[in-house]
Amino acid sequence: MPEDNLKTSVLSSLFWKFLERGGVSGVQFIVQIILARLLLPEDYGIIALIVVFIAISQTFVQSGLGTALIQKKKVTDADYSSVFYLSLGVALVFYGILFLGAPAIAAFYNQPLITPVLRVLGLTLFFGAVNTIQNAVIARNFLFRKLFVSSLGAVLLSGVVGVAMAYAGYGVWALVGQQLISAIALCIIMWFTVQWRPKLIFSVARVRELFSFGWKLLVSGLIDVTYTNLSSLIIGKLYPASMLGYYTKGQEFPNVLVSNINSSIQAVMFPAYAKNQDNRPMVKQIMRRALVTSAFLVFPAMAGLAAVAEPLIELLLTDKWLIAVPFLQIFCAVYALWPIHTVNLQAINALGRSDVFLKLEILKKIVGVSMLAVTVPIGIYAMALGMIVTGIIATFINAYPNKLLLDYSFAEQWKDLMPALILSLVTCGAAYSVLFLGLSVLATLVLQIAVGVVVYVGLAWVLGLESLEYVLNTVREYFPGRKGAV
């Protein structure tokens, strides 16, 4: 694809991906606030346990083949259809495992409700299998506008169902209904908005070719999902379900913000990397831009969220959720590192080096499990803090291969990141100081946000930060009649 066309596709896709994530996350955020006020922390704790087993199963269903479809230079109907039928078959196998294993899981955690809930939520595996192909078609063709329409429709419908069930007193089943309807609605809407249909084709050769790349991502994804949720499995066993609810709610707020910013950029940049995988200098240029832009937006968002955590939780979720405040602040530091992880790993995958990706995942998880082994005996807060240390170490590990692959060293990356990091820490301190004024909860929150935005944007403008100029130029360039370079 010519550079000018790539620029237009990336900017347009980035706009729609931001809009999709912003719209979906905005609606989900409102829905989750309403549900959290109506439901109990224990309800969220039970769902958090169940989601672990579904996430692991979903990793097998996807098998890394969705990413392989995006990364492959030329894809045919035989590729899409073969992956489609294989994914459905794997979904059937793992749903059977979940259905039969649900009573044993419920007995282990002494939560009888897990059995019926897991059996119902496990149905999302089938819709996820279909959605894997639909997302690959969208990413390969930069059709993120269609994803926006589909995702927003699904989250609106599922949100209405979830809130209605919560008001009707269905408890944990309100969360089940919301997630199940979301998966079904997304799959159905995308069936009509994405012009792809499976054909009666199944090629073992095509699957084998894609799996030669995807199996490493499958193993990597399985390791990552298991490790990421390992703390939830441990907390669910050692602590009451309510404590797991506080822990997961603390993750939710930073996860929403980072997914909305970082994931939008990376979802668009991966196919851009892949289309230029034979041009290493161009991949480095795209990678650097993605890293700096993500950090410029993610770092202050996480710093600001940590500063406003207490009044935000108290105002939106009520006093019953205040125990989640320290978890929220800790996870802000954890999620702030995501731009460094994702940018480096996506560049490696786009270059076709899933073997390197797998080795990195194994090494990072050894570090992470070792940290968990040290912190579990100390307590739940130590477990959360240990994730910050693990995340910092992981930034070194993820960046190392790109010194050789793209001549983009860890030191060079941090040199690019440092301006945004320093300004974010200053912003956090300024916003946090508002807490000492003794104002009402609402006034404190509003003033903290105002101070944070003014300090960060003001300092970035005064210092002439490159990232601010790039973000503003990118917004201008999207609209017709404006020209510029990516």
Image: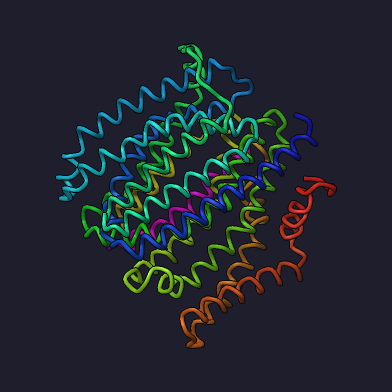
Where is residue 206 drawn, in percent x and y? 51, 15
Q: Which residues are magenta?
A: 377-404
Is residue 344 among the parts visible in the rendering?
no
Dominant secondary-structure state across the stretch colored magenta: helix
Is residue 112 covered in magenta? no
At x 26%, y 61%, the residue is: 242
Q: Position of residue 78 (x, y in %)?
A: 53, 15
Can residue 311 be seen at all in this image of the molecule?
yes
Q: Nearer the viewer, residue 13 or 468?
A: 13
**Quarter of the image that includes the C terminus:** top right
In the image, 196: left or right of 486?
left
Q: Is residue 452 above or below residue 416?
A: below
Towards the viewer: 35 or 273: 35
Q: In the rendering, at what x and y percent does residue 305 appear?
A: 51, 67
Q: Using the rendered view, name the quadrant where residue 328 is placed.
A: bottom left
Residue plotted at (61% across, 56% down): 295
Q: Quadrant of residue 252?
A: bottom left
Magenta span includes 398: yes
